[in-house]
Amino acid sequence: MTQRAELATVMDRLAVDDLITEYAMAVDDGDWAAYRGLFTADGRADYRSAGGIEGGAGDVAGWLAGSLELFSMRQHLIVNRRVDFGILDHDTGDTARVRADYLNPLRCAGDGDGTASDLVCGGRYDFALLRTPEGWRLRQVVVHEKWRRLPEPDPASVPD
């Protein structure tokens, strides 16, 4: 591999990494316009393993917006990113696949009494990306939730 090819690969890797980070930040910040903008026009997401839906980016953004209203704080940590690049046989654009683990703590809003509890889940993402004239975009996101820890019940509300 030439130095020029190696530099292009490094630059693509950084751009792909930035896209995955933007994805996490859009979800955590509830920026659904930014979320939709990260996908190709035909991009899809599948959250069924986490109790969600599968569909186009716009439909999934709507579902996420409603579902995540229950949480006053969200913070995706997407780690252990494995990136593989490829070229589509029928397309001139480049492709990438990313497998990455996630840890997602969520703060459940309290009842206005200053109390709150946490839900934490973890699993793996499979991202399929396509290089477009606007840069790298998501073609598909599949969530594979592996575990979930629900909030602890309030001891004062548990009957003796």
Image (cartoon, rainbow, N blue to C red):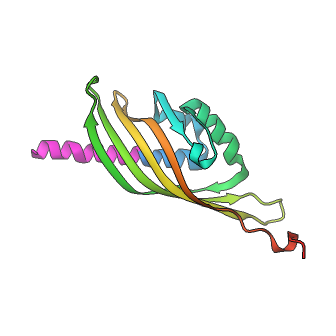
Q: Is residue 125 above or below residue 33?
A: below
Q: Is residue 44 above or below residue 71?
A: above
Furthest toward the top, the residue is 90
Furthest toward the left, the residue is 2
The image quarter containing residue 138 is: top left
How many numbered discs, if any? 0
Q: Is residue 111 visible?
A: yes
Q: Is residue 18 magenta?
A: yes
- Tell me which residue sits at (57%, 47%) in the image: 49
Residue bounds of the magenta highlight: 1-19
- Quarter of the C terminus within the rendering: bottom right
Q: Is residue 119 above or below residue 8?
A: below
- Tell me which residue sits at (64%, 46%) in the image: 51
Q: Nearer the viewer, residue 37 or 145?
A: 145
Q: Is residue 152 magenta?
A: no
Point out residue 91 in the picture as x, y percentages from the top left corner: 28, 24
Point out residue 17 in the picture as x, y percentages from the top left corner: 37, 48
- Quarter of the N terminus within the rendering: top left
Prevalent SS, magenta region: helix
Point out residue 115 in the picture as x, y percentages from the top left corner: 78, 66
